[in-house]
Image (cartoon, grey):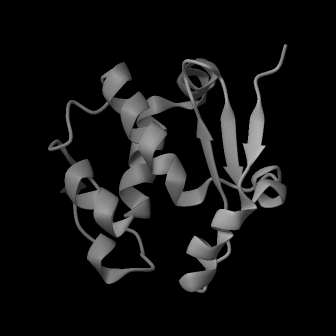
Amino acid sequence: QAAETVERDDLLSVFREKGLTGCFALVDAQSGRMTLVGAARARQRFVPASTFKIPNSLIAFETGVVRDADEVLPYGGGPVAVPAWAKDMSLREAMPISNVPIFQEVARRVGLPRYRDWLAR
């Protein structure tokens, strides 16, 4: 039996007030009940983009390819879209500025086989 899903499009005003388009999904881990705001959009597939930085970091810590949030990682020296990205930095520094080269370094360290394993979990 599938858990209940409750659609709360009355809460879309939170997005509209900020001039944004979006959705929100909340799953109660105990009951499995899901609450969706913007259900139609929530059911569409999108590239995770910067939101993947969160599981990316957690997988890096769990696999030991990054020691902790303060380990300094190399940015690689190539051209960058944002000047602030052009330096070695920790994940603690990289997360707030969404530093793509740092997270690409993390991805290289983790590697595809480990991502497949950890994301399946």
- Apparent side of residue 93 relative to residue 98 in the rendered image (left or right): left
The correct choice, above or below, for 90 with respect to 68 in the image is below
Image quadrant where one finds the C terminus: top right
Q: Residue 59's x, y, as percent?
A: 42, 29
Farthest residue in the top direction?
Answer: 1
User: Based on the displayed image, in which of its 4 quarters is residue 9 positioned?
Assistant: bottom right
Q: Residue at 45% x, 40% y: name it.
A: 56
Compared with 55, 105 (above or below) is below
Q: Quadrant of residue 80?
A: bottom left
Q: Quadrant of the N terminus?
A: top right
78 to 119, vertically: above or below? below
> Can residue 28 be seen in this snapshot?
yes
Q: How many marks?
A: 0
Q: Is residue 72 above or below residue 65?
A: below
When asked about the image quadrant of residue 93, the answer is: bottom left
Residue 30 position in % (x across, y down): 55, 18
Which residue is at the front of the view, 6 or 97? 6
Q: Residue at x 68, y 75 (%)?
A: 21
Q: Residue furthest front?
A: 10
**Residue 6 placement, left or right of 85:** right
Of all residues shown, which one is farthest toward the left? Answer: 70
Whole-percent x, y for residue 43 in the image: 82, 49
Q: Position of residue 29 (x, y in %)?
A: 55, 23
Q: Is residue 98 left or right of residue 45?
A: left
Q: Is residue 2 left or right of residue 50?
A: right
Asked whether 103 or 39 is in front, the reply is 39
For the question of whether residue 22 can be seen, the reply is no
